[in-house]
Amino acid sequence: MEAEKVKANIKVNGENIPLIVAKNDEPFFREAAIKINEKLAELQNKYGASASSEVLITTVAIEAMVDALQAFDNYQRLQHEISDRLQQINGRLDS
Protein backbone atom coordinates (compact mmCIF):
# COMPACT_ATOMS: atom_id res chain seq x y z
CA MET A 1 0.00 0.00 0.00
CA GLU A 2 1.41 3.38 -1.01
CA ALA A 3 1.61 6.14 1.59
CA GLU A 4 -0.90 8.97 1.39
CA LYS A 5 0.52 11.94 -0.53
CA VAL A 6 0.02 15.61 0.26
CA LYS A 7 0.95 18.87 -1.44
CA ALA A 8 3.58 20.84 0.41
CA ASN A 9 4.67 24.31 -0.64
CA ILE A 10 8.14 24.77 0.75
CA LYS A 11 9.89 28.14 0.64
CA VAL A 12 13.67 28.00 0.22
CA ASN A 13 15.83 31.03 -0.50
CA GLY A 14 12.69 33.08 -1.17
CA GLU A 15 11.39 30.64 -3.79
CA ASN A 16 8.21 28.59 -3.38
CA ILE A 17 8.83 24.97 -4.24
CA PRO A 18 5.66 22.90 -4.71
CA LEU A 19 6.19 19.28 -3.72
CA ILE A 20 4.05 16.18 -3.44
CA VAL A 21 5.32 14.13 -0.52
CA ALA A 22 4.23 11.30 1.72
CA LYS A 23 2.04 12.73 4.48
CA ASN A 24 4.34 11.30 7.15
CA ASP A 25 7.36 12.99 5.53
CA GLU A 26 5.86 16.48 5.25
CA PRO A 27 7.17 17.68 8.64
CA PHE A 28 10.66 16.59 7.65
CA PHE A 29 10.48 18.59 4.41
CA ARG A 30 9.30 21.64 6.32
CA GLU A 31 12.04 21.28 8.92
CA ALA A 32 14.61 20.79 6.13
CA ALA A 33 13.47 24.03 4.49
CA ILE A 34 13.85 25.88 7.79
CA LYS A 35 17.35 24.49 8.31
CA ILE A 36 18.36 25.25 4.71
CA ASN A 37 17.14 28.83 5.04
CA GLU A 38 18.97 29.21 8.36
CA LYS A 39 22.20 27.89 6.83
CA LEU A 40 21.80 30.13 3.77
CA ALA A 41 21.33 33.17 6.03
CA GLU A 42 24.43 32.18 8.01
CA LEU A 43 26.51 31.84 4.82
CA GLN A 44 25.12 35.09 3.38
CA ASN A 45 26.13 36.91 6.57
CA LYS A 46 29.57 35.32 6.45
CA TYR A 47 30.34 35.80 2.75
CA GLY A 48 28.00 38.66 1.83
CA ALA A 49 28.02 39.69 -1.81
CA SER A 50 31.22 37.78 -2.59
CA ALA A 51 29.28 34.55 -3.22
CA SER A 52 26.29 34.09 -5.51
CA SER A 53 23.06 32.44 -4.37
CA GLU A 54 23.92 29.44 -6.54
CA VAL A 55 27.27 28.99 -4.79
CA LEU A 56 25.65 29.31 -1.36
CA ILE A 57 22.89 26.83 -2.22
CA THR A 58 25.46 24.42 -3.63
CA THR A 59 27.50 24.76 -0.44
CA VAL A 60 24.44 23.98 1.68
CA ALA A 61 23.63 20.95 -0.50
CA ILE A 62 27.19 19.60 -0.24
CA GLU A 63 27.28 20.10 3.53
CA ALA A 64 23.89 18.39 3.89
CA MET A 65 25.01 15.43 1.80
CA VAL A 66 28.23 15.09 3.81
CA ASP A 67 26.15 15.14 7.03
CA ALA A 68 23.82 12.47 5.61
CA LEU A 69 26.74 10.27 4.52
CA GLN A 70 28.39 10.62 7.93
CA ALA A 71 25.13 9.76 9.69
CA PHE A 72 24.67 6.70 7.49
CA ASP A 73 28.27 5.64 8.13
CA ASN A 74 27.71 5.99 11.90
CA TYR A 75 24.45 4.03 11.60
CA GLN A 76 26.21 1.18 9.79
CA ARG A 77 29.07 1.19 12.33
CA LEU A 78 26.64 1.06 15.26
CA GLN A 79 24.61 -1.65 13.55
CA HIS A 80 27.78 -3.72 13.11
CA GLU A 81 28.81 -3.16 16.76
CA ILE A 82 25.37 -4.21 18.00
CA SER A 83 25.42 -7.31 15.83
CA ASP A 84 28.87 -8.25 17.14
CA ARG A 85 27.79 -7.74 20.76
CA LEU A 86 24.62 -9.78 20.25
CA GLN A 87 26.72 -12.60 18.80
CA GLN A 88 29.01 -12.43 21.86
CA ILE A 89 26.01 -12.57 24.20
CA ASN A 90 24.51 -15.47 22.27
CA GLY A 91 27.87 -17.26 22.44
CA ARG A 92 27.98 -16.85 26.20
CA LEU A 93 24.41 -18.07 26.59
CA ASP A 94 25.08 -21.12 24.42
CA SER A 95 28.11 -22.07 26.54
Image: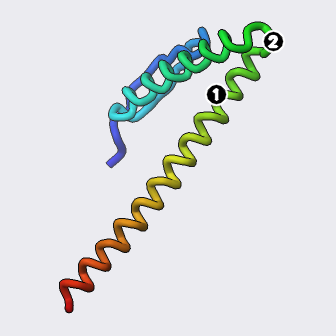
User: Is the C terminus in the top left, top right, bottom left or bottom right quadrant?
Assistant: bottom left
Q: Is residue 73 left or right of residue 5?
A: right
Q: Amino acid at mark 2?
A: Ser
Q: Residue at x 36, y 45 (%)?
A: 2
Sequence-wise, the earlier of marks 1 and 2 is: 2
Q: Amino acid at mark 1?
A: Val
Q: Residue at x 48, y 18 (%)?
A: 34
Q: Residue at x 68, y 23 (%)?
A: 57
On residue 28, the disc is: none
Foreground mark, 1 or 2? 2
Q: Residue at x 41, y 30 (%)?
A: 28
Q: Is residue 87 left or right of residue 74?
A: left
Location of mark 2 (residue):
50
Of residues 90 and 3, the one nearer the viewer is: 90
**Horizontal and vertical percent position of residue 22:** 39, 35
Location of mark 1 (residue):
60
**Horizontal and vertical percent position of residue 77:** 47, 61
Question: In 3D space, how far apart are the residues under numbered discs 1 and 2 (Cα atoms)?
Answer: 16 Å
**Horizontal and vertical percent position of residue 36:** 55, 22
Above or below residue 73? Residue 29 is above
Q: Is residue 16 left or right of residue 52?
A: left
Of residues 60 and 24, the one nearer the viewer is: 60
Coloring scheme used: rainbow
Mark 2: few/some/many CA within 10 Å (<14, 14-19, 20+) = few
Secondary structure under badge 1? Answer: helix
